[in-house]
Image (tube, rainbow, N blue to C red):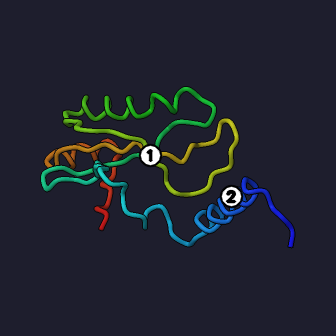
Amino acid sequence: MLAMPKSLFTILILLTAFQAFAFSEKKQSDLPPPSGAQVVNSSTPDTVWVRRQSQGKQCSDESKTSLELAARDLSAAGVHVIESKKQGDGKMHPALCGLPTGNSDVIRIPKSDLPKAMAKGFEEVPASP
């Protein structure tokens, strides 16, 4: 039997464990949130999330300011912006400068302001189960 250094044996065990975890069929959304994590993306009964396709392009500074512009656009229409974030569409996109990023500007607003937001081109984000 061949003698194997302990450090090499440890590395092999860690690599095997990593492969088992990395290639398992569980998706990130199937995993429970880490302990102490706070779920921020849920709506309350009197608020809703709305989204609009980001106008940002890859390799462009516009993609960084798109969210601010969307929030400013809603505010100018009389919509109270509570919270905003970027969200990917979950699809694969080719990495090439000038192509769309596939991100959406997602903004939480009062439910009473939904018609104003929809008039500005936003759509309501369906509630997650």
- Give how far apart the Cα atoms at labels 2 and 1 are: 44 Å
For the point 22% across and 53% down, the residue is 43
Q: Quadrant of the C terminus?
A: bottom left
2 lies left or right of 62: right
- Residue 36 appears at what percent x and percent y? 29, 50
The foreground one among 109 and 112 is 109
Identity, as a three-letter code, of the amino acid under mark 1: Ser
The foreground one among 93 and 77 is 93
The foreground one among 126 and 75 is 126
For the point 44% across and 47% down, the residue is 87
- Residue 109 appears at what percent x and percent y? 22, 43
Q: Which mark is residue 10?
A: 2
- Residue 1 appears at what percent x and percent y? 86, 73
User: Quick one: label 2 or label 1, which is nearer the N terminus?
Assistant: 2
For the point 31% across and 43% down, the residue is 107
Identity, as a three-letter code, of the amino acid under mark 2: Thr
Q: Is residue 62 above or below residue 82?
A: above
Q: Which mark is residue 104?
A: 1
For label 1, the crowd category at 10 Å Cα-Cα, with few meaning under 14, some 14 to 19 and many 20 or more, is: many
Kind of element beneath mark 2: helix
Kind of element beneath mark 1: strand
44 lies left or right of 107: left
